[in-house]
Amino acid sequence: MTDALRRTPLYEEHLALGARMVPFAGWEMPVQYAGIIEEHNAVRSSVGIFDVCHMAEFRVFGFGAFDFLQRMLTNDLHRISELGQAQYTLLLDEDGGIIDDLIVYHSGDLEYLVIANASNRDADFDWLKQHAPADLEIVDESDRTGLIAVQGPKALEVITELAGPEWQLPPRFRIGEAMLDGKVPVLIAHTGYTGEDGVEIVCSASMAPAIWRLLLSFPEVTPAGLGARDTLRLEMGYHLYGNDMDREIDPISAGLGWVCPKSKSGYMGSEAVARVREQGPDRKLAYLLVEGAIPRPGFPVLHEGDEVGKVASGTFSPTLQSGIATAYLPAELASVDTRLDVSIRKKTAKATVAKAPFVTTTSLAG
Amino acid sequence: MAHPSDRKYSNDHEWVLVDGDTATVGISHFAQDQLGEVVYVDLPSEGDSVNAGETFGEIESVKSVSELYAPLTGEIIAVNDSLGDTPEVVNSDPHAAGWMIKVRMDDPSEYDGLMTAEEYDDFVTAG
């Protein structure tokens, strides 16, 4: 028996736009509208908008909010001590396994907004609840919260036009309030998952369709699906939970040591992180450029004919016109320029370990 | 885009255009639309033989990969190598410039067993 797929508040909008809908993490989501490459290029050259309403939002509120999250999350919350600041962070188990990757916003006095992966919504919420002091309020606001990503070199022009001349764009990795079209109150986070400049609009779920249509009224805006979201994020080497990390993988092996500051200790999983950091990981996430075929998750990675790992994330890079992938490899093979092969059905394709990001010419680069 | 009626179609969404004993083979407009933007086409070599119903190559879009099934039996006498550099032609012009192989047919009666454009349109609508 399968559970019915859930639909975001923008479901009808996607159908009207002729989207191809697919199941994703229990949701019925648009994988593409006009075409993955076309949408990818629209984000790299103009503006694309993404329905990310399926993502989870938790509000953590109370006098103990800081202490609790500082204990549960890897990154140092002191770095976002000002209201409106945000950071990328990880939720680990006792053994250092990654439960989820999150963005935490310092959304108010004694209050944090946590944005999590749709697929981990229940696991994250249960984990947090289970470890929280009784007087701390942790609320799953996912159902009443809408989230629309607006990404691309012209994204800020569009959002500024909608928010009005008085409005001040929050600096990068900060969130602020705005009134779109003079009447729709939203939060605007200067964040994203594409490598382009842009924002993510946090709104009431009921207002999401109106905001979506407002954005589409700009001729430079293209709706973009999960297909383009994946090619865009992988070109930047951004991790995807479930492919590039899971409970069996620690942050150091995943190349996410930068969100586990050495100066911070005492958080859940910190001893395991320190141990791997000290000893060096056996396997590391490597980035592969693959010639002439698309490496897909699960395909074997070979070194001199022996299987040394499997593709974790893999796709076609529309910008580079080449296959790109990530794979966990023995640490000694994970260094840049190592020559490997990827077994792709009946043949093998040449692969070279590369540096992330694969694409360095985006509006956020430099 | 309609499926042209000057040729026939297979259950596996290949089209076949016959000239004498030579059959040109490609994939249908419907098939390219289902696949999405094609990024790699892997074709056999001239001189290889193909058997009706068996695979002769692979076509890959960002999201998926599909095998190409030969609609007829025979020897490959030409391969559209330009698809190596411009696979997107399969999307933009599937019924002409996006052709894939030319086959010298062993058994021209195999062609008779394929669907007409009208039958194929019904087939994909019902599918």
Image (cartoon, coloured by chain):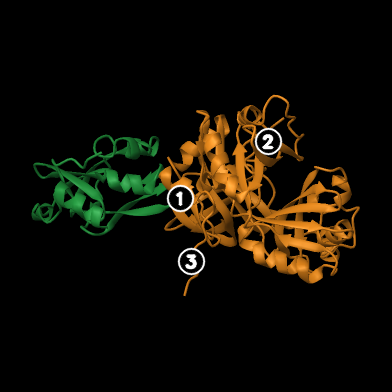
Residue A50 tag number: none
Q: Residue at x 73, y 61 (%)?
A: A139
Q: What residue type is labelled 2?
A: Met
Q: Quick one: SS at disc 3?
A: loop
* Residue drawn at the location 68% of the way across and 33% of the way down: A364
Left or right of residue B68: residue A8: right
Apparent side of residue A354 relative to residue A168 in the rendered image (left or right): left
- Looking at the rendering, which quadrant does residue B96 occupy? top left
| Amino acid type of the residue tagged 3 in the rendering | Ala
Q: Name the residue under label 1.
A: B63
Q: Which chain: orange?
A: A
For the residues labelled 2 and 1, say whether their Cβ atoms are less than 8 Å apart.
no
Furthest residue toward bottom? A1
Q: Are marks 3 and 1 on the same chain?
A: no
Q: Distance between the residues labelled 3 and 1?
A: 24 Å
Residue under label 2: A179
In three-dimensional space, the C-alpha distance between marks 2 and 1, rounded to whole angstroms, equals 37 Å
Q: Is mark 1 on a helix, strand or loop?
A: loop
Percent from the top left, x then y, of residue A137? 80, 62
Quadrant, the C terminus of chain A: top right
At x 59%, y 54%, the residue is A54
With respect to residue A293, does A25 lie above or below?
below
Question: In which chain is the residue bearing label 2?
Answer: A
Q: Which of B124 and A237 is in front in this view?
A: B124
Label placed on residue A4 = 3
Give the farthest residue toward the top.
Answer: A165
Q: Which chain is green?
A: B
Where in the figure is residue B40, as x and y percent of width and height? Answer: 41, 44
The one nearer the camera, A155 or B86, is A155
Amino acid type, mark 1: Lys
Read off the chain for label 1: B
Q: Residue furthest front?
A: A183
